Image: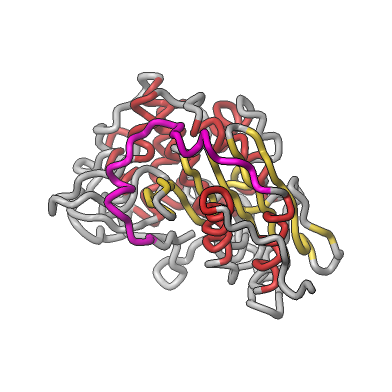
Amino acid sequence: MRVVIRALSVLALLASALPASALAADAVDPPPAAFDAIAARALAKNGAPGFSFAVVHRGRTVYARGFGLADVSRNEPVTAGTRFVVGSISKQFTAAAVLQLLDDGKLRLDDPLARYLPTLPNANAITLRMLLNQTSGLHNYPLTTEHPWPLTGAIAPARIFAFLATDRPDFEPGARFEYSNSNYAALAGVVARASGMPYDAYLQRKIFAPLRMASSGAGLAAQNLPHATPYVGATAFTVPTPIISLDLFYGDGSVVSSVNDLARWDTALIHGTLLGPQAMHDLWTPPRLQDGHDGPYAMGFVPDTVAGHREVWHNGLTPNAGGYCYNALFPDDDLAVIVLSNGSDFSERPEAMVREVIDAYFLHRIPLTPPGAK
């Protein structure tokens, strides 16, 4: 689940939030063979038995395919409809849920955490905004060397918060940025308290169902439905034991989805149909830190640029439950790239695929020949 923050450029931080640019208007979709070649190169580098890959442009899925195997023992192929545990990409949904509740007048971003979860450390001084921006100081979880975390079966959020309540904060609220899953577990609890329904049910009713994300869900219930088997290892793939319950990763890594569903999600965000304008601005805009610099994290998204194009992204890996996944949006170009895998050692492949997609669209570097072809 831990995100790797890439270096940010000044362009990424100063770019406007408008969803379409002249570049987007000029972009022409490369042929499917170009995307096939990009995927073939990633598959040849190993790291996962299989992955799915989608490209969304101007609200239309122009490419969606699966590569390799969703389950090695059954020789089951990955398709565009294969469900994956998407890891910390889940944080995008938690952030959006909080901002929906803000739009509905059910909470404020400057509310103290104590209004919803008073037992957590520094709850009176931590605001919801700090949790969203990863500046709260809450200690990261779940480290099995620190607590006897439950790993299997149904896990009530109260059990998670009972452990988090005993952790010492890493720094004073708002002092600096530090990525912590605890921030988004707390926010899932806020969603439940403010909405009056369980977090998983809120996502289903307010996000997945309206966007027709029929393959998506969260927590153990979603994990118990068919999805890609997780594997560890770079070349010799094995299934981890035990496979950890997604209930443990409450709000921060518990979502199961497919590239087809995430294409709908990305389109709704880029086109501004899910959240109001101010909420969308907050979602993708990093905060000003106490040292005067802009933080590297917005709200469930990392602002960045690729080849001069504004990008907002998040990666994800839920340990012993899913593989390395990546969701990248280019709002000014009305473009998104989604890569979901079932391998824990698949990192850097999706990032390279995103760069190749940008090259194909805007630098007209269209690689049609997959590796090993003559």
- Which residue is pictured at 72% across the width and 57% down the height? 36
Q: What colour scheme governs how the chains and residues are painted in the rendered image of this protein?
A: secondary structure
Residue 190 drawn at (x, y percent):
39, 36
Residue sitting at x 54%, y 41%: 335
Farthest residue toward the bottom? Answer: 236
Report the front residue among 109 and 263: 263
Whether the magenta-drawn stretch holds residue 193 is answered as no
- Which image quadrant is residue 352 in? bottom right
Determine the image quadrant of residue 141. Answer: bottom left
- Main SS, magenta residues: loop
Q: Is residue 331 left or right of residue 289?
A: right
Considering only vertical position in the picture, is 337 above or below 317? above
Foreground residue among 87 and 182: 87
Magenta stretch: give its range: 5-30
Residue 334 % position (x, y): 52, 36
**Count of marks overlaid on the render:** 0
Q: Is residue 9 magenta?
A: yes
Q: Is residue 166 visible?
A: no
Q: Of 75 and 130, which appears nearest the observer?
A: 75
Query: Residue 324 at what x, y percent from top left?
Result: 58, 62
Q: Quadrant of the C terminus?
A: bottom right
